[in-house]
Amino acid sequence: MISFEKFRTTFNLFGSYAVTSRYQMPEQKQVYYGARILSRFSDKTSFSLFYQNNYMPEEYYTDRNLFELLFHQQVFPGHEFDLSGRYALQRGEMGSKDFILSLRYTLRLNVPTQKKAEFTSLYGNISNLGVEKVEGIRLMLGSHLSVTDLHGNFVFKNIVPGDYVLDIDRSTTNINDIANVTIPAALYLCDNENIFNFGLTEAATIYGMIDYSETGQTGFAQVPAAKEKRKKENIIIETSDGEHTYRKIVALGGYFDFTYLRPVEWKVKIYRNGLDKKYKIPIEHFDLFLQSSETKKIIFNVVKQQTEVRYQQETVRVSYNQNRKQK
């Protein structure tokens, strides 16, 4: 095959020689040759010519063009005409050729058959609020991944708009690093450019105990209560920042802790959990503002009041009747 282009016209010349012994035709020799010329007069007008002298026996069951002329013209945008004439061998014919002349008009409406997918991007930065590094942190947005650069910048590109959840791969941060916003974060990505920034700091801890004691008042006689099997009493400790709430069940005299907390204001409360009224709790809540990497220690006091019996000191008068019956 020989191909070359000149004067905005492409020329393709081809030829082959075959000797076959198939289809009950031994030692059949055949030369195949042809040409195709395509000329573009302008962006709207083109002309093409095709010629081939014969076809291989395998193509007997298809339509075969021997000679074809085609003229294409775009009249207006979306309006096109094609004028063609050709000699062809129809399927199953060997020597009877047909001449076909056709005129085709094409109207291109440019009406979309399906909605074109639109994409958006998410840009953001992780600021350093006292951690060792913000580089190399892996973020996950649905099935998309991004890794922060030296300055904590990250980007997700070619994202279909919609609802997503942004999360951090904690294996790429230090064990005590925590975001200053709620992560995972629910995000809605619109068609325009989307930006989401947050910081990374060190988590805080609340450590405490339930200080249990028993006491009574003097000035009254105290009667030791009969020995009874002491039931294990539990109370509930709750801490909340208004967005997250954590609870723990703690025995009297026991210890508790809340770890991996954001450095914000936390309220710690104690709930009696059915505790008898004889147990007094002087302070039932603490308001704490935690700093980065701080461990705050608190104590709840629980005091059990002793059973008291008060003796009445008044005199009791006793009298009897000595009158006798007169006869």
Image (tube, rainbow, N blue to C red):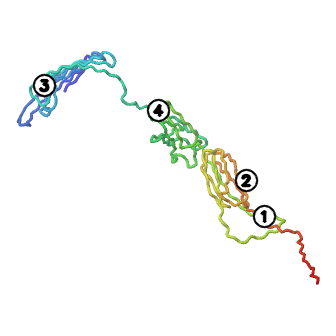
Q: CA distance from mark 4 to mark 1?
A: 71 Å
Residue 159: x, y in percent? 45, 35
Q: Residue at x 16, y 23 (%)?
A: 51
Q: CA distance from mark 4 to mark 3?
A: 55 Å
Residue tagged by mark 2?
283
Q: CA distance from mark 1 to mark 3?
A: 122 Å
Mark nearest the camera among 4 and 1 is: 1
Disc 4 residue type? Answer: Thr
Q: CA distance from mark 3 to mark 2?
A: 106 Å
Q: Earlier in the sequence, mark 4 or mark 2?
A: 4
Mark nearest the camera among 4 and 3 is: 4
Q: Earlier in the sequence, mark 4 or mark 1?
A: 4
Q: Earlier in the sequence, mark 3 or mark 2?
A: 3
1 and 2 marks in contact (CB < 8 Å)? no
* Residue 37: quadrant of the picture: top left
Residue tagged by mark 1?
216
Q: Is residue 244 above or below residue 115?
A: below
